[in-house]
């Protein structure tokens, strides 16, 4: 979902711990429309899973499981 050319911007936005709503919103707007729609669906799914009473995973655990699937594979092998 996150494009290879923008990945370094996303990493930089969260590395220093001072990410803001405006900076994240700006990065989201730079994604292609179809990527934003997929990301919206993924977040909606994660929210629905977290809201179910039978779910034993915390939201941060779900993010750890789903997150790597949103990052371009080439970026993992390059690091």
Image (cartoon, rainbow, N blue to C red):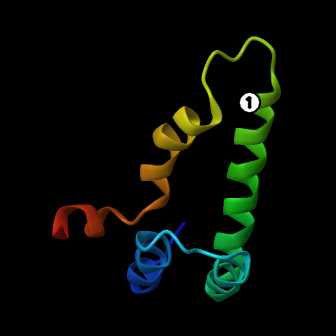
Considering every residue shown, the one lying at the far left of the view is: 78
| Crowd band around label 1 with a 10 angstrom C-alpha radius: few (<14), some (14–19), many (20+) | some
Q: Quadrant of the C terminus?
A: bottom left
Residue toward you, 28 or 24: 24
Front residue of this view, candidates 17 and 35: 17
The quarter holding residue 58 reads: top right
**Residue appearing at x 57%, y 35% in the figure:** 62
| Residue, disc 1 | 50
- On screen, residue 5 versus residue 60, left or right, reads left
Q: Is residue 46 left or right of residue 27?
A: right
Q: Quadrant of residue 78?
A: bottom left
The x and y percentages for residue 52 are: 81, 21
Where disc 1 sits, the SS reads: helix
Q: Is residue 16 left or right of residue 78?
A: right
Q: Height in image: 79 above or below 32?
A: above
Residue 66, position as x, y percentages in the image: 52, 43
Image quadrant assignment for residue 71: bottom left
Task: Pick the quarter of the image with the N terminus.
Answer: bottom right
The residue depicted at 38 percent of the width and 81 percent of the height is: 8
In the image, residue 39 above or below residue 53: below
Classify 52 as above or below 68.
above
Image location of residue 63, percent across then percent down: 55, 43
């Amino acid at each position: 979902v996150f494009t290879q050319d923008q990945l370094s911007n996303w990493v930089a936005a969260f590395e220093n711990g001072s990410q803001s709503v405006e900076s994240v919103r700006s990065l989201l707007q730079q994604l292609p429309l179809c990527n934003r729609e997929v990301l919206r669906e993924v977040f909606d799914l994660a929210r629905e899973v977290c809201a179910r009473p039978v779910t034993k995973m915390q939201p941060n655990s779900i993010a750890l499981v789903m997150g790597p699937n949103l990052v371009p594979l080439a970026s993992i092998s390059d690091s």
